[in-house]
């Protein structure tokens, strides 16, 4: 987190776009189960009324909230914008005839609320830029000759993710979704694989993707991803979750698009929480030369075979 704050806030002059994926909100049928899962994962889980808020230890930002409802469902996604850009976003929504909606019940916010093409509520709100202003560091630790490098199992440290990295959501229509997030929120396409998956970044300096989309029969949350300082800590995190009974998932591996090292832990609702490290970064003054990549050159460079149901939307078409 220190590397987020050590750099001045980056901003691309004259162009309108959100700067961060500010926070997400989804429901689950058992909030206590969620509290345990994310606490074991290494997050700072704070209870507030009838919801839990997901923080990373030592960082003031609230990256997400989980509420209790009859089933797991992506409720809304909130993006952060610079204060003086908010009137321009308001004008843009009006010019595009995008219907404004009220905030969801129980949410107090004076941001701009509307729905994406899949009907999922979205917000643009004034917020501190929580996306990093430079590429996050990757630590590699090696011990000198004569000193044992690995800790004992009994003394291995618990991992703590540094920040939210991104989220991946299901959508019915990839081309329509790319156009919507480009034209409304000002995100830019980083890379895609046909009409199956797409990755988008924020124009004021962000990771290769703040949000990504995968085609399905309806909207839903596939995974949320958390930035880790090292590949070693991805492995430690996977063991930390396995020790608590969360053995299902996918990893260790390395993605092609975005380049990050990963381990996904399956949550109790069939979606995933990802430990991620060294994802590509797109600086504020760079125009990323993305592409449309064949499926075999999109998913992963190395790693175990993914679970057969990895891309299944358990929220279903009824969402
Ligand atoms: Fe991811």
Image (tube, rainbow, N blue to C red):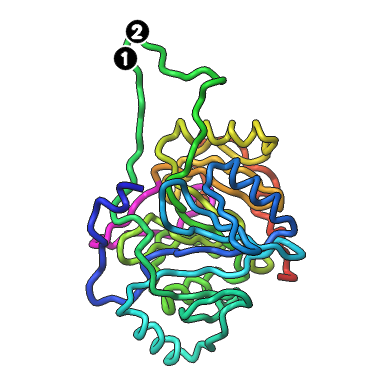
> Dot 2 surroundings within 10 Å: few (below 14), some, or many (20 or more)?
few
In the image: residue 307, left or right of residue 10 = right
| Above-or-below relation of 15 to 253 | below
Quarter in which the C terminus is drawn = bottom right
**Residue 91, position as x, y percentages in the image:** 39, 89
Quadrant assignment, res 316? bottom right
Q: Position of residue 123 (x, y in %)?
A: 49, 75
Q: Distance between the residues labelled 1 and 2?
A: 6 Å
Tell me which corner region of the image, top left, top right, bottom left or bottom right, holds residue 229: top left
Which residue occupies 49% across, 69% down?
A: 78
Residue lying farthest to the top in this orientation: 146
Q: Name the residue under label 2.
A: 146
What residue is shown at x 48% (from left), y 56% (from top)?
Answer: 166
Query: Does residue 193 appear in the picture of this structure?
Result: no
The residue labelled by disc 1 is 144
Label 1 with label 2: CB-CB less than 8 Å: yes
Q: Is residue 9 above or below residue 135?
A: below
In magenta, the rendered stretch is: 279-298
In the image, residue 95 above or below residue 134 = below
Asked whether 280 falls inside the magenta stretch, the response is yes
Judged from the image, the secondary structure of the residue bearing numbered disc 2 is: loop
């Amino acid at each position: 987190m220190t590397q987020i704050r050590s750099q001045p806030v980056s901003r691309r002059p004259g162009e309108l776009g959100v700067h961060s994926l500010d926070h997400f909100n989804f429901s689950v049928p058992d909030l206590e189960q969620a509290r345990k899962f994310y606490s074991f994962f290494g997050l700072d889980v704070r209870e507030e009324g009838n919801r839990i808020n997901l923080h990373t230890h030592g960082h003031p930002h609230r990256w997400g909230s989980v509420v209790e409802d009859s089933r797991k469902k992506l409720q809304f996604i909130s993006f952060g914008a610079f204060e003086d850009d908010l009137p321009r976003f308001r004008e843009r929504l009006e010019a595009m005839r995008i219907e404004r909606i009220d905030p969801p019940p129980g949410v107090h916010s004076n941001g701009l609320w509307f729905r994406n093409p899949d009907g999922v509520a979205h917000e643009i709100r004034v917020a501190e830029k929580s996306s990093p202003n430079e590429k996050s560091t990757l630590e590699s630790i090696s011990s000198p000759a004569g000193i044992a490098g690995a800790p004992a199992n009994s003394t291995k440290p618990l991992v703590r993710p540094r920040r939210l990295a991104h989220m991946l959501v299901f959508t019915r229509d990839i081309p329509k979704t790319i156009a919507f997030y480009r034209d409304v929120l000002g995100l830019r396409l980083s890379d895609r694989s046909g009409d199956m998956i797409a990755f988008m970044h924020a124009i004021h300096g962000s990771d290769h993707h703040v949000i990504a989309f995968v085609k399905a029969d309806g909207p839903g949350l596939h995974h949320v991803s958390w930035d880790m300082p090292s590949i070693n800590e991805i492995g430690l995190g996977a063991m930390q979750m396995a020790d608590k009974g969360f053995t299902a998932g996918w990893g260790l591996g390395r993605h092609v698009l975005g380049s990050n090292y990963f381990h996904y832990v399956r949550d109790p609702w069939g979606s995933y929480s990802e430990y991620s490290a060294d994802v590509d970064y797109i600086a504020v003054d760079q125009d990323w030369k993305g592409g449309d990549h064949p499926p075999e050159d999109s998913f992963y460079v190395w790693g175990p075979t993914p679970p057969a149901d990895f891309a299944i939307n358990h929220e279903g078409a009824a969402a």
